[in-house]
Amino acid sequence: MSKLSPLFLLNLKMADDASSSSACTGNLIENSVNQDELIMKQQREIEKEISESIPLVGDLEELSSLEKEYNEDPVYMLKVKDLASKYKSIRRTRPDGNCFFRAFSYGYLEHLLTDKKEYDKFYEIAKNSKEILVALGFPQFTVEDFYETFMEVVQRVGEQAGGAPDELSSIREELHDKFNKQGYSDYIVVYLRLITSGQLQTQHDFYQNFIEGPRTVTEFCRQEVEPMYKESDHIHIIALSNALNVGVRVKYMDRGEGSQVIAHDFPEGSSPLVHLLYRPGHYDILYA
Amino acid sequence: MVEMGEKYNTKCPGVKRLMREAMELAEATEEYCARPLEDNLFEWHFTVRGPVGTDFEGGVYHGRILLPKEYPMHPPHIILLTPNGRFEVNKKICLSISGHHPETWQPSWSIRTALLALIAFMPTPAEGTIGSLDYSPAERKLLAKKSNTWVCSQCGDITALLSSTAAKPPTEEEQTVLNQIAFKGEDEQARPAPEPVFEPQNVPQYAERVLESSDNTTSFLDQLTEILVALLVGVIGIFIYRRWNAHMPVEPEL
């Protein structure tokens, strides 16, 4: 009882509030919108709390660090074991809804440091991406702003790409530092979100099939792709990997049957350069 | 702007972005103008012209823009200072996408987007939204007239701030975006984090949106909890009543 009564009092109080403010909120639709906003506000506070405790992109950890998380959980322990047979380490990202974009870009740029040929290919695609976005009607002024910061980081990688392994440590540190500076890190995420949205809109006939409900591709992009903190689904991954022509392998680890962690390659049949671990609602980076 | 460059870290993308926006908006247009305060890049003052063909025609409205430190990842806040009959003055209002997806600000929008949206939103019905005012057309027209003599303590005579010739109307793409933006007051009361509201008509909605499942058992359980609580309160009531009676004999002994 003592556990329930505060809720009950709160209930009374809320009901009171509702009746006293009914004069200005008149109808139910308005009420439900307010509800939505209160919920979102609460969500944001939770997000903020999380963000203060986890780095945007963490240090490299042994894959066995996952075991600690799932101690005494036989289903997950088997799967961690399976994962450990293919991957040595993991790099965690902050679960803030941007984790796919952050994990992907970090993993890919890291790969580019060791693959000059791939870098040159990527550089051309990245360089042309702005024009595509502006042609689609994105505001030139702000697109340019994101583009410039994005390219600044890309070019820093390019300067060192293909260098001797022991000479790469300072650029690796710089990359890690940039990805953990909220300003830079978020700008990279925004730009990848724009590229994703651009790809979806350019090929809207194809992607329309993936969208449930009555939303158009453009509406979907405005609501689920372009805003920050919106989580990524298959459609985001398919679009981004197609737009940049980069293979991504996602290992899906959940409570599903069996002891294997199922892998999925995007685009299908590609040879993956970036490996991500997906656990319900979150992406981290995997290293072989 | 030179001093700004010294004061802020121009390497920080958010600062760089605001300085670019300041440059872009430095030249006033017929419809709007905005610039940062001399000593604070994160607070701006703006002036907008009331849209032609509405109750606000002929009006000139001044206000503040407060930029969060996360800008442009989070939206700017707008505060109107000139009485206008549509928005409360001195109250933070913010943009949201009208309809069912509130608060989906996009980093590719800018202060210009916010100002154009504000102008476009002024003639829309207030409908009792927080921060909105429902003044009559006559009152709004009177305020529009009066607004021309309104003076900002920092910027002075505001009518002089707008250009009389330079037009920079929204592009077609901007217009489609503007049509979706709504403004409303921010709930500034420091309310406790919203607890689930156990109102039967709200429960299914709440459960659906938060848990992303239309699982009926959730709402059923919530309703059950409510009934149980009501019952327990009732029982306690009866219990207290009986104790009370036990201590205060009401029936005279014969």
Image (cartoon, coloured by chain):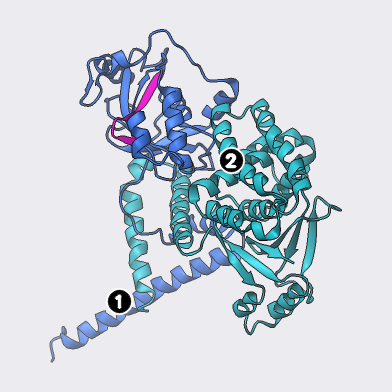
Chain colours: A cyan, B blue
Q: Residue at x 65, y 64 (%)?
A: A280
Which quadrant does the N terminus of chain A fall into? bottom left
Res. B166 image quadrant? top left
Q: Is residue A226 above or below residue A9?
A: above
Q: CA distance from mark 1 to mark 2?
A: 70 Å
Which quadrant does the C terminus of chain A fall into? bottom right
Q: Is residue B244 left or right of residue B105?
A: left
Callout 1: SS: helix
Q: Is residue A162 above or below residue A130?
A: below
Q: Is residue A42 left or right of residue A222?
A: left
Q: Residue at label 2?
A: A152
Q: Main secondary structure of the magenta part?
A: strand
| Chain of residue at mark 1 | B
Magenta-tinted stretch: B32-44
**Residue B42 is covered by the magenta coloring:** yes
| Chain of residue at mark 2 | A
Q: Percent position (x, y) of residue A35?
A: 45, 51
Q: Residue at x 43, y 34 (%)?
A: B18
Callout 2: SS: helix
Q: Residue at label 1?
A: B237
**Residue B199 is covered by the magenta coloring:** no
Q: The disc labelled 1 sits on which kind of residue?
A: Gly
Q: Is residue A67 left or right of residue B111?
A: right
Residue placed furthest toward the right = A269
Q: The disc labelled 2 sits on which kind of residue?
A: Glu
Q: Is residue B75 visible?
A: no
Q: Percent position (x, y) of residue A63?
A: 67, 73
Which of B253/B1 is in front?
B1
